[in-house]
Amino acid sequence: QVQLQESGPGLVKPSETLSLTCTVSGGSINTDDYNWSWIRQRPGKGLEWIGYIFKSGSTYYNPSLKSRVIISVDMSKNQFSLKLSSVTAADTAVYYCAREGPGGSGTYDSWGQGTLVTVSS
Amino acid sequence: DIQMTQSPSSLSASMGDRVTISCRASQSISNYLNWYQHKPGRAPKLLIYAASTLHGGVPSRFSGSGSGTDFTLTISSLQPEDFATYYCQQSYSSPPYTFGQGTKLEIK
């Protein structure tokens, strides 16, 4: 049973870069079967897909965030990461990592429990 | 982007009740519709994919139906562990795959 766990700072200052890591256990990230995604939930809002990365390093981002997002993968550590630049209070959210698959189905069959990131000075 | 609208936004029910949650898409999405259960502080769980296919390990009291723009999640007999927030999500065409705003199921 694959498990995902988010980690990173819980507080980020405005205009700085939010950085989170998702550690995958119980399965390899180096697989053709899945994409690895980031999703967030801002207070009082629904879930918002941020983007995904495939093992090859190819990425796809939500157009609404594309200019500020970078998702990367570290096969040696079985991790993938999110960087969101120039953050504002509107980026305060619970951030989830999730596995999408198989075959880019758009179905998220495993999730981390989420990590709250607050943007504040 | 395709907009997903759930109703109701909250629902009070009792143990053993039959409960139905609706989800409507702003355009036809065939059967590319998934349902998730989310409890506070926990990882969301996939319940149903492709509108009506139960994900592995999900109890049979959960069922999904619909196609096109209108979909339903039904819980046939509520159990204590079912009180949670439920989200629908479309996976039609290419990303961004969008979610409904959620339905919070509470104990009456």
Image: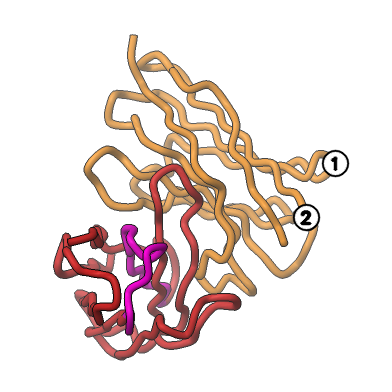
Chain colours: A orange, B red
Q: Which residue is mark 2?
A: A26
- Between label 2 and label 1, give the one nearer the viewer: 2
**Residue B18 position (above or below residue B95):** below
Q: Residues within 10 Å of mark 2 (few under 14, many from 20)?
A: few
Disc tally is 2
Q: Is residue A7 magenta?
A: no
Would you identify the image quadrant in which residue B97 lies?
bottom left
**Residue B50 position (above or below residue A100):** below
Residue B79's tag is none
Q: Amino acid at mark 1?
A: Ser
Q: Is residue B89 magenta?
A: yes
Which residue shows up at 36% across the image and 68% down it?
Answer: B89
In the image, the segment drawn in magenta is: B75-92
* Label 2 chain ID: A
Which residue shows up at 41% across the image and 63% down it?
Answer: B81
**Residue B51 position (above or below residue B25):** below
Q: Nearer the viewer, residue A75 or A98?
A: A98
**Residue B106 position (above or below residue A107):** above
